[in-house]
Image (tube, rainbow, N blue to C red):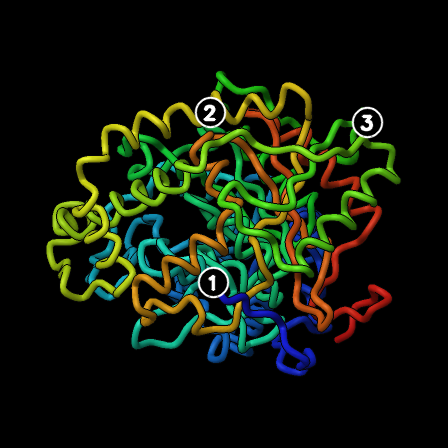
Amino acid sequence: MVRFFFFRGTTMTDSLHAFRDDILADHDATALAALIARGDIHPREALAAALARLDQVEPRLNALALDNRENALKEAEKNTFSGFFAGVPSLIKDNTDTAGHPTGHGAAAVHPRPARRTSAFARQYLAQGFNLLGKSRMPEFGFNGSTEFDGADPTRNPWHTAYSSGGSSGGTAALVAAGVVPLAHGNDGGGSIRIPAAACGLVGLKPSRGRLVDGEAARALPINIVSEGVLTRSVRDTANFFHAAEQHYRNRKLPTVGRVQGPGQARLRIGIMPDSITGTRSCPQTRAAVADTATLLESLGHRVAEAQIPLPQRFVDDFLLYWAFLSFMVSRFGRHMLSPDFNAAELDNLSQGLARYFRAHLKSTPAMLWQLRRTQRTYAQAFRHYDAILSPVVAHTTPELGYLSPAQPFETLMERLVAYTSFTPANNAAGSPAISLPLAQTDTGLPIGIMLSGRHGGERQLLELAFELEAARPFRRLGHTQTGQAQF
């Protein structure tokens, strides 16, 4: 029986953020880029403020995997940035290569050497003008839904430091929510953008398969479930990121996202799915948050009705086996894939348990791959009658640290992870877009993310809907009063 952890009767006194009355203020990345472009702020000043904020919160948040301040300071002095976000401080996740820096993948088993070249996606990211002050922390190989480690301190949620920041882009989420940078990189292979966005009160769009340049490892997968993206504090930052990314690379097989600047005019047919295909019933607070969002959408003129994505129950077992396959490949071929010094004996309990699970179910692999490849077609059937699907991001409110720790017995941890992350993997297998929006909160103030899923290639419609919801119910942020005013 899965035990849900809820935000107990504590207050938000254990929150931690770095918002202050400095150059960064509470600007999103779009506003900061405009100030830099006009010459009101120099990239050197923006970086100095971000580093001061980082130093204020990082010893407690434990969200930074690599400190790149020396290189970032040199780049800021040169000020040769170009692109929509020229000079804006940012971070890249610690599973993405940038030349001259190690890539640790969150794993003690990896003993990385500096990368020889910048990865294809990192080039697309940097083409937008970001100044990288470091790499963000992640759980081992991104397998966990919480950024926790066996025998090391976890990454903490800035809304309440006793709680998870989500995973696997948990370091990114913590630093963006805490105000260190306004926007940073994440990627999503089973919910790894949307889950931390939900936990930390951010906007997190997992795009369609192939929308952005794929990472080298993702391209080598038999089924590419990983999409690149960002976590932000505003819908317009997410929209501007994807528009700017298209200037570097555009997938001609997908509709153009283009410049999305506000709500769309069309009134949509929206299906509501409060429970997942696993049969897991959402916790009461999460369920109420989805119902409240449905009411809000109806008040805006959209048509809302109950729906279900017609995936079979065996999808859960298939995705779990694919997840285990990835861990097996890492454990078996890590020296060739990652580092000559890779040591499988240093893998955490989750990675080792997943590898064992795959070996025990090896004979099911061909059927699993066949079924997962059919997911895109099955998923698309839900959109014969609906333009978007409304659901939770996760099945229950953000757990306390330790609940999803890799130090837990493997069987216990897997039971908890499958229940918690039961909504997000369908989009990864289907290759479809989905966005997490911070539209609700627990009765004591911890964020609850609401997910909207769309058709393959339908990011523009999701962003227009997100703009509309953000305007109707402005997102809460750390460092703001209940009236929405910045509180420094």
Q: Local crowd at mark 3 within 10 Å, few (<14), some, or many (≥20)? A: some
Location of residue 434 in the rendering, given as x and y in whole percent from the top left corner: 58, 38
Please tell me which of labels 1 and 2 falls first in the chain.
1
Q: Decide which of 154, 427 is in the foreground and name it.
A: 427
Please tell me which of labels 1 and 3 falls first in the chain.
1
The residue that disc 2 covers is 376
Q: Amino acid at mark 3?
A: Arg
Q: Nearer the viewer, mark 3 or mark 2?
A: 2
Q: Amino acid at mark 2?
A: Gln
Q: Whole-Å distance between the Cαs marked 3 and 2?
A: 25 Å
Q: Secondary structure at mark 3?
A: loop
Q: Residue at x 32, y 59 (%)?
A: 140
The residue that disc 3 covers is 267
Q: Residue at x 50, y 56 (%)?
A: 420
Q: Is residue 79 above or below residue 158?
A: above
Q: Whole-Å distance between the Cαs marked 1 and 3?
A: 39 Å
Left or right of residue 67, residue 454 in this image? right
Location of residue 76 in the rendering, given as x and y in whole percent from the top left corner: 51, 57
Q: Local crowd at mark 1 within 10 Å, few (<14), some, or many (≥20)? A: few
